[in-house]
Amino acid sequence: MKKLLWINFLVLFALLFTAFPVSAQSETPGEQPVYIVQSGDTLSSIAVRFGTTENDLLTANNLPDANSLSAGQNLIIPGLEGISGTLVTSPVPFGDNLRTLSRRYRLSTDLLSHLNHITSPDELYAGVNLIIPQTDQPTLTGKVALSQGESLLEASMRSGVNPWLLASANGLNDSSSAQPADLYYYPDADAPEGSGSISPAIINVQISPLPLVQGRTADILVETDQPVSLTGQLGDYTLHFFEDSSNHYSALQGIHAMIEPGLYPLTLQGTYGDNSSFSFQQMIVIESGNYIRDLPLTVDPTTIDPAIVKPEEEKILAITTQITPDKYWDGVFVSPASYPDQFTSLFGRRRSFNGSDYVYFHAGVDYAGGTGLPIKAPAPGVVVFAGLLNVRGNATIIDHGRGVFTGYFHQSEIDVKVGDKVETGQVIGLVGGTGRVTGAHLHWELWVNGIQVDPLDWLDITYP
């Protein structure tokens, strides 16, 4: 009896497959596509992006010159026959490819390739901003990933998704059109935007910011439908994942402020409870932080002598690459300074000492303020260093757990000792002018997995 019901279901499924037409972009003849100008865009860069000329853009939009362009402006893009509506940009999520994006946005691969000048599907990297024409059909967010050797029907039943809905949404004409080990989308308003076909057990992967940026903190979140042991690699960085809640995992990684912008491999690997495993790698974009140059500085030559600087750097690195599994902070950090909005230098700025090339960068934030002002802990943690250093002067370093450390340098006085547990707002020392300085100030640094990042991000963003 069960066998007969199963056969009847398969026959009905095959018949209904043909009842749904392939989804296509709606076109309105005579309308020209519009692009919303983004911050940092120029008329030249927009012309290159869309394969047109600056003169054609000026003419189509009745613009007097290229300087009349402004962020948020609607710009008509000439020469894109058959395309209408608003063109938006969206970064390619980690795990997606041209096929899966075509299904998600209900657009043909030819159209996506034409708009984005994609000559090979392998050129689609995570973090690349993709131009997407908005249609009258909502973006699909529900995901069903087929395991190797699994049919679309079997995957539908496993995921609890209506198989005919899945077939219709992906424009499939028959069951043989579904590709093994591939990803298919369906309408689900509650499903998160996220990963593509990484593993059937992975519900979502989110990476922020995307693309990655020099000097920023990369936040990688993975959600699965079962427990998994996760590892990963971003370029030369080994990722450390922690379980925040049931089947929700996160890893934080600092992106070096002077890493060469470009493409880097991001690898995720996991092992499930049944000893099955997966491994997925995709190139991801790291962009420039667009840091400016500080004026040249003159300092005591001994404080830039490699014989003095290198041992201190190695000492700091040994401290800040330790991984404490406990997480001591909760929510955003607070400023450690008495005057939290007054800076003398910001993170990432390129620096020249004593006439050198700009081969240095500012590894933290300098707060204005004179000797004796209190320095406060920005979040709970444990003191792991308190003492005098040649370059950093009187220094305190706090471990906040999970590879996150903060440092406070050039102090006139240190008010804590190694092993002390500190709380948010607790005074840990006083501002001073010890070490390599040109005047009294608070230099504040923050490390994530051994890499200095902009600490001001941590005052605005809640990291897991």
Image (tube, rainbow, N blue to C red):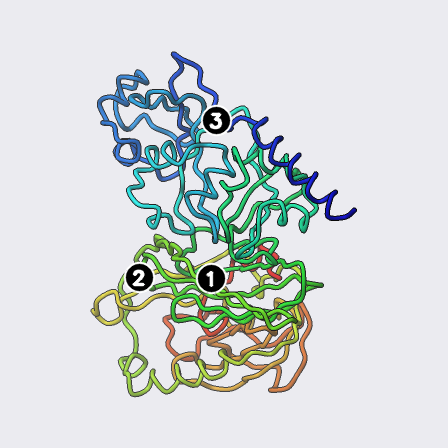
Please provide percent x and percent y for residue 193: 57, 45
How far apart marks 2 and 3 lie (CA) works out to 40 Å
Q: Is residue 440 above or below residue 136?
A: below
Name the disc covering residue 260, or none. 2
Please provide percent x and percent y for residue 366: 45, 64
Examine the rendering and report whether any part of residue 374 can be seen.
no
Q: Earlier in the sequence, mark 1 or mark 3?
A: 3
Q: Is residue 336 above or below residue 20?
A: below
- Find disc 3 in the rendering and name its residue: 24
Circle 3 packing at 10 Å, graded few (<14), some (14-19), many (20+), is few
Residue located farthest toward the top when viewing the structure as drawn: 30
Residue located farthest toward the right when viewing the structure as drawn: 1
**Which residue is more in the foreground, 17 or 92?**
17
CB under 8 Å between callouts 1 and 3?
Answer: no
Instruction: Kindly identify the residue that appears in the image at 62 percent across and 62 percent down.
Output: 464
**Which residue is more in the foreground, 2 or 268?**
2
Local secondary structure at mark 3: loop
Examine the rendering and report whether any part of residue 224 can be seen.
yes
How far apart marks 1 and 3 lie (CA) works out to 30 Å
Local secondary structure at mark 2: loop
Q: Amino acid at mark 1?
A: Phe
Q: Earlier in the sequence, mark 1 or mark 2?
A: 2
Name the disc covering residue 280, or none. 1
Circle 2 packing at 10 Å, graded few (<14), some (14-19), many (20+), is few
Q: Amino acid at mark 3?
A: Ala
Instruction: Kindly identify the residue that appears in the image at 48 percent across and 21 percent down.
Output: 26
